[in-house]
Structure formats: C-alpha cells, structure tokens
Amino acid sequence: MDYVSALLPPFVMAALFIGVIRVIIKTQGGVNKTKEDAAVDAALAQAQATPRREQA
C-alpha cells in the first residue's frame, strides 16, 4: 500500500498540469486575443514612454 501513497501525488500533479495546459491552449485566440494584445500594447507603450534613469 506504500507504493500507492508514493505514486498518488505525482499522478495528481500531472493531471492538474495537463488541465492547466489545456485551459491555456483553449483560451488562446478569439475574443481574449484582442484583449490580451491590447493589454500588452498598452504596457509596452507605457514602458517606452517612461524615461529610463542611468545607473552610476
């Protein structure tokens, strides 16, 4: 019975990891893509507009 308790956590983590990957793949593109692209463009524009300080 010790082998079952030793193998259970890796199988649970693998199943959760596969679930997360599936959600990430399913949410790519579509309506979400436009919102995500707009958020990234806004962040890049803000980063480029912020003056950089030179380090001594």
Image (cartoon, helix red, strand yellow):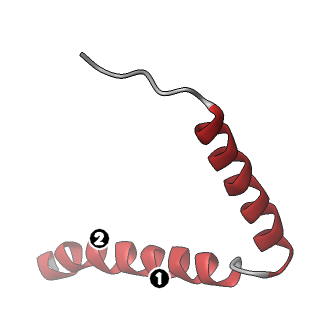
Answer few, some or many: residues within 10 Å of disc 2's Cα (few below 14, many 20 plus, some between 14 and 19). few
Tell me if 15 is positioned left or right of 44 in this view: left
Residue drawn at (86%, 74%), measured in percent from left and top? 31
Instruction: Give the label on residue 9, or none.
Output: 2
Q: Position of residue 27 (x, y in %)?
A: 71, 77
Q: Considering the numbered disc 1 on the image, is that residue within a helix, a strand or a loop?
A: helix
Q: Position of residue 29 (x, y in %)?
A: 75, 81
Q: Earlier in the sequence, mark 2 or mark 1?
A: 2
Tell me if 32 is positioned left or right of 56 in this view: right
Which quarter of the picture shows residue 55?
top left
Q: Considering the numbered disc 2 on the image, is that residue within a helix, a strand or a loop?
A: helix
From the viewer's side, name the closer residue of 23 and 14: 23
Residue drawn at (13%, 75%), measured in percent from left and top? 2
Kindly identify which residue carries mark 1.
Answer: 18
From the viewer's side, name the closer residue of 32 and 16: 32
From the viewer's side, name the closer residue of 51 and 13: 51
Q: CA distance from mark 2 to mark 1?
A: 14 Å
Q: Amino acid at mark 1?
A: Ile
Q: Amino acid at mark 2?
A: Pro
Answer few, some or many: residues within 10 Å of disc 1's Cα (few below 14, many 20 plus, some between 14 and 19). few
